[in-house]
Structures are given as structure tokens and as C-alpha cells.
């Protein structure tokens, strides 16, 4: 039953990733810009000040790219946790668990970037595959550390 539940969660999470990747470039950029705007609003409230337009543009210029890459790491971190816990239900040894989990996440990251080649204004990036895979490896390692003390041989 746990395995079926994890397959459902995996399907849902992969669908969420797919929906982000399926956004046209304008939609994706608007989402990133809204995140930056929220950060600026928080900084303004914490400092009890208003950030001027020149500084706001500089923040956008410097913050959007790292925020987009952090989003990659985060969504694939979660994917790594889900995949690791699913693979864990097959009761295989630690090395195989890591290898299979990483390969699944790498394969999904690769197909996700290929998918973006067919979305208006988007492009596929080998660098993003690397970032995604690193995020999933972090999730896999953390998941294994937290949830998998006795199960793997």
C-alpha cells in the first residue's frame, strides 16, 4: 500500500514539474519576478523602508537567475526524496538504492529539459539537468539519512 501511495505522489510531483516546464517563457519569467517582488516586499517591511526603482531593477537583475536555479534545486530535491522512498520499498542494498534513485531523477531531469525545447520561448539546458540532478541527490541523501537507518543492507 505504501508503494502505491508513493507512486501516486511521484506521479503528482512529476506532473507539477511538467506543468512548470510547460509554461511559456513569459509565464515562467512572471513567476520568477513575483518571487523577487515578494522578497523585496519582505526586505522593505523588515527595514521599514522603500526600495527605489533603480535599486529594485538592480535586485531583479541580480536575483532572478539564482532564484530560478534555486527553484530547480528545490523541486528536484523533493523529487529525490520521493523517488528514494519509493525505491526503498523494494528493499535493495544501499548502493543500488542510490544508483537507481539518481538514475531515475537524472532521466526525468533530462526528459524535462528536452520537453522545454518544444515550449514557446523556452530552451533545454544541460546545465539545468546538472542542477536538477544535484538537487535530487541532496534529497536522496537526506531522505536516506532520515528515513532509512535499518532498511538498506
Image (cartoon, rainbow, N blue to C red):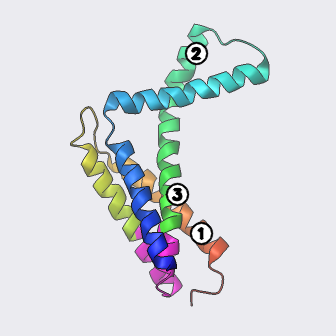
Earlier in the chain: of badge 3 and badge 2, it is: 2
**Horizontal and vertical percent for residue 21?**
34, 44
Residue 93 belongs to the span the image colors magenta: yes
Q: Badge 1 is on which residue?
A: 143
Looking at the rendering, the stretch of residues picked out in magenta corresponds to: 83-102
Q: Residue at x 52, y 37 (%)?
A: 67
Q: Main secondary structure of the magenta part?
A: helix
Of the two numbered discs 1 and 2 in the rendering, the one whose residue sits closer to the viewer:
1
Magenta highlight on residue 133: no
Numbered badge on residue 77: 3
Viewer-nearest residue: 32 or 58: 32
Which x, y percent locates residue 99? 43, 76
Rendered residue at 55%/18% (across/down)? 58
Numbered mark located on residue 56 in the image: 2
Q: Quadrant of the C terminus?
A: bottom right
Q: Is residue 59 left or right of residue 130?
A: right
Say which mark, if any, is on residue 73: none
Horizontal side of residue 53 vs 24, given as left or right: right
Element carrying mark 1: helix
Considering every residue shown, the one lying at the far bottom of the view is 153
Choose between 98 and 91: the one closer to the eye: 91
CA gap, disc 1 to disc 2?
A: 38 Å
Residue 127 at least partly seen: no
Amino acid at each position: 500500500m505504501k508503494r502505491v501511495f508513493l507512486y501516486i505522489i511521484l506521479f503528482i510531483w512529476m506532473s507539477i514539474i511538467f506543468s512548470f516546464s510547460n509554461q511559456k517563457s513569459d509565464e515562467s519569467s512572471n513567476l520568477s519576478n513575483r518571487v523577487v517582488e515578494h522578497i523585496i516586499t519582505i526586505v522593505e517591511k523588515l527595514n521599514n523602508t522603500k526600495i527605489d526603482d533603480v535599486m529594485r531593477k538592480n535586485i531583479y537583475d541580480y536575483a532572478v537567475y539564482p532564484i530560478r536555479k534555486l527553484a530547480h534545486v528545490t523541486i528536484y530535491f523533493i523529487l529525490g526524496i520521493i523517488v528514494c522512498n519509493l525505491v526503498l520499498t523494494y528493499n535493495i542494498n544501499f548502493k543500488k538504492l542510490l544508483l537507481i534513485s539518481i538514475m531515475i531523477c537524472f532521466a526525468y531531469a533530462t526528459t524535462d529539459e528536452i520537453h522545454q525545447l518544444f515550449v514557446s520561448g523556452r530552451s533545454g539546458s544541460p546545465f539545468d539537468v546538472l542542477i536538477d540532478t544535484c538537487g535530487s541527490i541532496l534529497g536522496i541523501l537526506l531522505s536516506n539519512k532520515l528515513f532509512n537507518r535499518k532498511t538498506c543492507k
